[in-house]
Amino acid sequence: MYFYDETWFTLQRGMAALHLHDWQAATDHLTVGLDALPDEYRRDKTWYRACLAHALAGAGESAQAVSVAVASVPDAAAVGRPHSWNELHATAAVLLRRGATEGQQLVSALREYD
């Protein structure tokens, strides 16, 4: 993304909220931003989806987090290394620390592309 429009600012608000562990705000902003991001921004969409998965995991929405994360794994492996890939590993770590069974599901999906 090489321009600063409302979509970019929405996504950046989501990233700020993610870093502040404001999981709901991060989820809201990232969802809105992703919906507005053009499909041709494959790498960016992969990155922000991985961040959305992390926010969902932080919010305790394990099923949604793993759904978003697992769907992102192929693109993260193909075009999103290292950032998206690392974010998906961070998401798995959050899920595992919380004792969510979905954490193992994500670990297995990531191993398929290692």
Image (cartoon, rainbow, N blue to C red):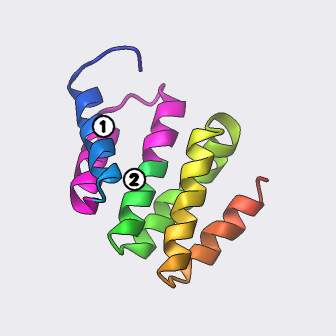
Which residue occupies 54% across, 51% down? 87
Displayed quadrant of residue 111: bottom right
Residue 99 at x, y percent in the picture: 51, 85
Q: Within 10 Å of the Cα at label 1, are there few (<14), some (14-19), or many (20+) other Cα atoms? A: many
Dot 1 corresponds to which residue?
11
Circle 1: element type:
helix
Position of 105 compared to 56: left or right?
right
Circle 2: element type:
helix
Which residue occupies 71% across, 69% down? 108
Residue 10 at x, y percent in the picture: 23, 36
The answer to whether residue 36 is magenta is yes
Quadrant occupied by the N terminus = top left
1 over 83 or under it: above or below: above
Residue sitting farthest toward the front:
20
- Amino acid under label 2? Leu
Residue numbers of the magenta segment: 22-49
Residue sitting farthest toward the top:
3
Residue 76 at x, y percent in the picture: 62, 44
- Amino acid under label 1? Leu
Which residue occupies 28% across, 61% down? 23
**Label 1 with label 2: CB-CB less than 8 Å:** no
Dot 2 corresponds to which residue?
52
Q: Within 10 Å of the Cα at label 2, are there few (<14), some (14-19), or many (20+) other Cα atoms? A: many
Residue closest to the eye, 93 or 11? 93
Position of 5 compared to 18: left or right?
left
Residue 46 at x, y percent in the picture: 51, 41
